[in-house]
């Protein structure tokens, strides 16, 4: 490992953070990986990613194509101990490096199920400590006990069969022991054996082995010769990773990614920032075919550029009309954000008009029905009153509904093939661009510099404690556990 080479490790219950840092003190340790996390980490430009632990049940698991995408970029990817061992066994032929006995057992077919490495564990505030025993640890411990003649073959086989029949969230070796020994004395002897160091934590051993391996290795970029197919769903995940906050939290993150993560607790309309980032990303690609440049915008440039792009496409969509279809919010920075939104929407809609794209009638009808339902305009009288209040004709409403229906389908659902563009997925952080543009980035940076920063952050977090899962999702939290992880981390703020 060369100086200044960034190594990112996804770690949870397999090995304590303290033990891991002893092996690899300069690494960036992040919580167990979930879907999209590796794509976000690629933005850090690491020399290596070590995947040890990952979530898989309460949230979508890491995709295989994420790992292949990192390999395509020349990043060394190592897997061991848990989710990492499983993925490495599946992807080692494409360049992922598997380390340890668990990886070998998966690779050679001695084990083949996810539950072999799954455990019930605490969250961040308790350092992800495992509550149950992994099946791979039970197998390793029983094999050791057999070698030491603490148990016989028949008992070991019975205990393994019993362990496999128990759900991983309830699987505990001590409980299994009491149900399979012929006498209390035998059971006590086995428990004493465990207390004296007989328990084999194979997951921890493999995790340590992987960290030692990467510490002693000099990483040289070797891009995979096989490009990753950019399928519809994978393009959607790439698009999402460019336009959302950095999901994994650590105080050791570089400043832009730390502020990106914390931005969720500062924003009343998080989803609006995500939508703006998604539009900015696509508008930048479209603008390559126009005389205008969108990759870097400042608030002072936008009004003039908006006038120019409106004339270029011969198109008018007012800020007020945008506000009818997109929930803009009332933050102090919203005027800058709305001006940017107007420019981006004009650019993309202008492109749609030139290409003569129209939504399918069924899709448009559903979009209008949803709009009327959300705005409580189900009756004809209410709808006509709404049109009158906003000084809008029915034909103009249908015209705007066409535009925003297409934006919803093509941009926000990543179906942009019809735009005939090939987005450059260099994983530029468009979400952070929006934070900079609106001044939110500067605001968060100032808060973090204050002596009572932790108190201010905790005050802002109070409103989230009363939210249900659906409301949390709208604010960028995958679930309540992710919120608790952030609260725990802020309680341990190092500065």
Image (cartoon, rainbow, N blue to C red):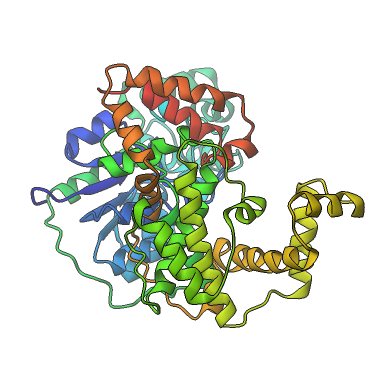
Residue sticking out furthest to the left = 3
29 and 39: which is toward the camera: 39
**Image position of 245 (left or right of 366):** left
Residue 439 location (% of width, % of height): 36, 41
- Asked where in the image residue 287 lies, by quadrant, the reply is bottom left
Image height check: is 285 above or below 122?
Answer: below
Quadrant of the frame with the C terminus: top left
Residue 308 location (% of width, % of height): 43, 69
Q: From where the camera sits, is residue 113 visible?
A: no
Q: From where the camera sits, is residue 235 visible?
A: yes
Q: Residue at x 27, y 66 (%)?
A: 73
**Image position of 231 (left or right of 1):** right
101 and 61: which is toward the camera: 61
Counting the numbered discs, the total is 0
Residue 387 location (% of width, % of height): 79, 54
447 and 333: which is toward the camera: 333
Residue 265 location (% of width, % of height): 46, 32
Q: Residue at x 47, y 35 (%)?
A: 332
121 and 64: which is toward the camera: 64
Image height check: is 42 above or below 264?
Answer: below
Q: Residue at x 55, y 21 (%)?
A: 183
């Amino acid at each position: 490992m060369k100086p200044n080479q960034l190594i990112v490790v996804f770690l949870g219950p397999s090995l304590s953070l303290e033990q891991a840092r002893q092996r690899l003190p300069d690494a960036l340790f992040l919580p167990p990986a979930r879907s999209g996390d590796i794509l976000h980490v690629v933005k850090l430009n690491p020399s290596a990613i070590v995947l040890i632990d990952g979530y898989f049940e309460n949230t979508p698991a890491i995709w295989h194509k994420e790992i292949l995408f990192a390999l395509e970029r020349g990043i060394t990817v190592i897997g061991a101990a848990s989710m990492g061992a499983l993925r490495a066994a599946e992807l080692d032929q494409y360049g992922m490096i598997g380390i340890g006995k668990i990886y070998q057992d998966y690779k050679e077919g001695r084990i083949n199920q996810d539950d072999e490495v799954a455990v019930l564990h605490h969250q961040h505030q308790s350092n992800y400590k495992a509550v149950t025993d992994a099946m791979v640890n039970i197998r390793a411990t029983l094999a050791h006990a057999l070698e030491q003649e603490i148990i016989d073959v028949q008992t070991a086989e019975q205990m393994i069969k019993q362990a496999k029949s128990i759900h991983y969230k309830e699987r505990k070796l001590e409980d299994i022991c009491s149900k399979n020994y012929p006498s209390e004395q035998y059971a006590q002897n086995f428990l004493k054996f465990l207390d004296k160091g007989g328990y084999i934590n194979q997951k921890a051993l493999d995790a340590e082995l992987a960290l030692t391996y990467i510490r002693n290795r000099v990483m040289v970029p070797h891009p995979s010769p096989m490009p990753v197919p950019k399928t519809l769903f994978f393009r959607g995940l790439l698009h999402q990773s460019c336009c959302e906050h950095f999901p994994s939290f650590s105080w050791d993150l570089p400043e832009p990614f730390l502020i990106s993560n914390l931005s969720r607790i500062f924003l009343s309309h998080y989803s609006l920032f995500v939508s703006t980032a998604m539009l900015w990303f696509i508008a930048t690609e479209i603008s390559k075919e126009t005389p205008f440049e969108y990759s870097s915008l400042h608030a002072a440039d936008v009004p003039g550029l908006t006038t120019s792009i409106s004339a270029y496409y011969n198109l008018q969509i007012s800020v007020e009309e945008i506000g009818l279809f997109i929930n803009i919010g009332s933050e102090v920075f919203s005027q800058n954000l709305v001006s940017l939104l107007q420019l981006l929407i004009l650019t993309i809609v202008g492109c749609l008009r030139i290409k003569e794209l129209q939504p399918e009638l069924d899709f448009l009808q559903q979009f209008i029905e949803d709009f009327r339902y959300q705005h409580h305009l189900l009756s004809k009288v209410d709808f006509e009153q709404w049109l009158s209040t906003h000084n809008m004709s029915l034909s103009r409403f249908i015209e705007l509904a066409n535009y925003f229906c297409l934006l919803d389908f093509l941009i926000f659902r990543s179906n942009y093939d019809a735009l005939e563009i090939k987005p450059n997925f260099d994983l530029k952080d468009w979400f952070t661009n929006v934070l900079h543009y609106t001044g939110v980035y500067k605001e968060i940076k100032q808060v973090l510099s204050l002596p009572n920063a932790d108190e201010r952050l905790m005050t802002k977090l109070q409103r989230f404690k009363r939210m249900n899962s659906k409301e949390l999702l709208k604010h960028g939290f995958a679930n309540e556990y992710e919120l608790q992880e952030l609260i725990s981390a802020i309680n341990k703020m190092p500065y």
